[in-house]
Amino acid sequence: MAPGAMNRWTTSLADAKPVAYWLDDPGRPAPEPALTGDARCDLLVVGGGYSGLWTALIAKERDPHREVVLVEGREAGWAASGRNGGFCAASLTHGLGNGLARWPGEIAKLEELGARNLDEIEAAVKRYSIDCDFERTGEIDVATEPHQMAELRELYEEMAARGLAGGAELLDADALREHIDSPTFLGGLWDREGVAMLHPAKLAWGLKRACLEKGVRVHEHTPALELAPAGAGMAVRTPYGRVFARQVALATNVFPSLVKRLRSYTVPVYDYALMTEPLTDGRLAAIGWKNRQGLGDSANQFHYFRLTADNRVLWGGYDAIYPFGGKVRAEYDDRPETYAKLAGHFFTCFPQLEGVRFTHAWGGAIDTCSRFSAFFGTAHKGRVAYAAGYTGLGVGATRFGADVMLDLLSGERTERTELEMVRTKPLPFPPEPFAWTGVALTKWSLARSDANGGRRNLWLKTMDKLGLGFDS
């Protein structure tokens, strides 16, 4: 890469604010008061991201008389729920390929439940008048190398053989350029119905408002510090009080679980994104993004990109950074060397947009588990339920996870609790320094695979056989 080109690309970042675009909104709601003193309730929800907000809301929908309290350490939606790309996918398994590899016998049911879940999200957005720029555009997985096109064709053929290709369309290079034009695109697989684009922070804020309207007591700036049995229920200690609850739903995801034995099942992986200034009509026409689908390339180290309501381009992904020791720290949210790399990749993909400036650049932690999709369970004799490990596809799947947690707390067998996906756990990550070493070797191997026609080395083949992985 020529130094002049790098200087030209990094100039585009000169005015970028190191703040998540979605959260940089003067219309964001004021926080609810912190908890002081003791509170009692039927259900305590710990965590004010999508997972916790959906759990509290659905709990009140199922039983309006249930006393529900939600505590959040900062403000609702401030972490992953307000920093992601806004891809709300029907998939519950981090994509069909991962689902086929792990639960082939259940894949039809998982796809059905995922499609139903996405429909229910859309219905809730309408029912509660949540203004979050919800657009059911679908998503195109794009091939930028010949082996990726072969893999997409193979996946499409397997989908067709299993009767799962009804909403999918395989696009060659010319057909893809009818939707969006980049000299790097060789073709793609369009999921026409299974993905919506939305404004992630506005979804979280809208869910918070809906919870309050339903009678949920929300306390922000109230971190949960300790979980312990208390009589027939549980008690959670906070800085200025306690909550006594019959049942608890843990929706803390990337943050250390209050059930300590679960902490080895997830690691934080930092993901980064850029947001451009709004595109002029001329610039938008130059790339021809007529149908506004979300897009993602098919490399192991992949990018995801989409249009906002005011025609900015979000461009994220590629680097997936695991900090030694697996700590979640604010200083990891900003990584200029990754922003420079992403800017270069952006203008390589869309040379027509040379001269466009980025207004925001940010990062955030993803709760990653070794099977790439959420796991579930109970603790403390069924009085506590948890869901975690969404690995970057939680915008939609967290609603399903909320239903699973509430099913588990009810003690009833449902079509969700009977799933192998719900009844089993991923393999835990090893302690340090083995976790960091394994992640580093996997990242190196994935980069080599991308550069060598998708060929997987012995390390990756062994990881595949063991059902282990690392992804964002």
Image (spheres, rainbow, N blue to C red):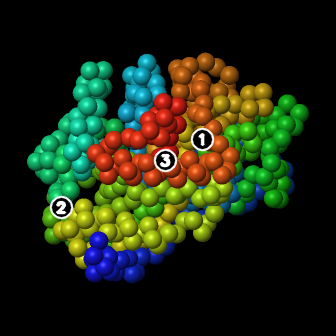
Numbered label tally:
3
Q: Which residue is mark 2?
A: 287
At label 1, the amino acid type is Ala
Which of the two discs, 1 and 2, labels the residue nearer the N terminus?
2
- Percent position (x, y) of residue 277? 32, 72
What residue is shown at x 78% (from left), y 52% (from top)?
225
Judged from the image, the secondary structure of the residue bearing numbered disc 3 is helix
Mark 3 highlights which residue? 442
Question: In percent of the image, x 61 and y 48: which residue is there?
Answer: 435
Check disc 3 and give the amino acid type.
Thr
Residue 227 lies left or right of residue 155; in this view the side is right
Q: Secondary structure at mark 1?
A: strand
Question: How much space separates mark 3 and mark 2, taking CA atoms?
Answer: 34 Å
Q: Residue furthest left?
A: 174
Q: Quadrant of residue 322?
A: bottom right
Mark 3 touches mark 2? (CB < 8 Å): no
Could you tell which of marks 3 and 2 lies nearer the N-terminus?
A: 2
Q: Residues within 10 Å of mark 3 (few under 14, many from 20)?
A: some
- Mark 2 falls on what kind of element? helix
User: Which label number is shown at residue 388?
Assistant: 1
Q: Work out whether residue 203 or residue 329 is closer to the camera in this orientation and state it.
A: 329
